[in-house]
Image (cartoon, grey):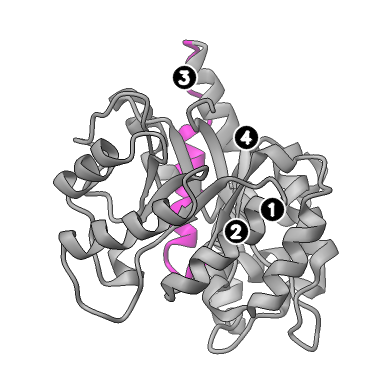
Amino acid sequence: MSKFEGIYAATVSVLNNDLSLNIDKTINHAETIIDNGCHGAAIFGSTGQAQLLSISEKINLLNKLSLSKHKEKYLIGTGLNSLGETINLMRVANSLSFNSFLIMPPAYYKYDDQDVKNFYSKIVEASPQSKIILYNFEKLSGYKFSLKCVEDLVKSFPDQIVGVKDSSYNLYENLKLENFSVMPGSETKLLSGLKLGCSGIITATCNVTSQLARKVYDDFKNGKDQTVNQKLCDIRQVFDRYNLISAIHTFLKNKDDIYKNLLPPLRTLDKTEEKDLINSLDKLNFSIKSLMAA
């Protein structure tokens, strides 16, 4: 398989008013952001409320996702603490010909590099055909990958451990491995990361910034002057003032009210926060109307 490169959105999950997963609209959203510039999308990442969704809903979505026109462009997030359930979900995905995964170490418990290597070793042993992007996000898991841990995992499993999403930002400037994808988790790191040899980004806000992010990526690859990178970074910094999932859903609900639905304890922004978000984005000439018209 070729190296993971480009602009990937950590796509949202769309919920019905009764908080069940709307499979059709979730898939349609993922397909739309790919159509609008993303090279691919991560399904069931943290932005997709992965820890809050039921396994049965995930399996039902995977079955229908296997019929998507962009089937080859999806990363499947496991979003599970249980080793056994992670392996079982991967086997279901494998049976549907999905072999690319975004996997974070378990949350809550305290552990070290050796324990992380053991965790991924068990996964690789159970699903050796899979390609795994490590998910480095200490804020959510409580663990931060070290350079040495990533290097050891790649040395042990060069055909399976093929990249890292770096949302803790301690790896992307210094991790240099052949045929290995390093992808920061923010648009503010896209251009600087590309200059350092990174492969692209996997981010929550590419749910709405896919066109701008793709232009920055393409202009860099084609040696063109950067004309929208500052705007892209400014937009990301506005969203960073809030819980990202809440802010993205608040922004998107102005396109379709169904995006207001989030699983507790998550919620959309309150009226004051929403007004500040929309006004701040308007000042950057970025709105849901301009996004829909583009």
Look at 52% across and 25% down and name the residue there.
2
Q: Earlier in the sequence, mark 1 or mark 4?
A: 4
Q: CA distance from mark 4 to mark 3?
A: 15 Å
Q: Could you tell me if the residues under marks 2 and 1 are in contact, i.e. CB atoms within 8 Å?
A: yes
Q: Is residue 277 above or below residue 217?
A: below
Residue 270 marker: none
The Cα atoms of the two marked residues, 3 and 2, are separated by 38 Å
Asked whether, in this view, residue 260 is left or right of residue 140, the answer is right
Q: Is residue 136 visible?
A: no
- Given the image, on which type of amino acid does mark 2 rest? Arg
Q: Percent x, y for residue 268?
A: 61, 79
User: Looking at the image, which residue sits at the far top?
Assistant: 223
State the image quarter where residue 49 is shown. bottom right
Task: Return the x and y of residue 44 as percentages of the image width and height.
Answer: 59, 63
Crowd band around label 1 with a 10 angstrom C-alpha radius: few (<14), some (14–19), many (20+): few
Q: What amino acid is labelled 4 in the image?
A: His
Q: Earlier in the sequence, mark 2 or mark 4?
A: 4
Q: How many marks?
A: 4
Residue extent of the magenta highlight? 223-244
Of the two numbered discs 3 and 1 in the rendering, the one whose residue sits closer to the viewer: 1
Give the residue at mark 4.
39
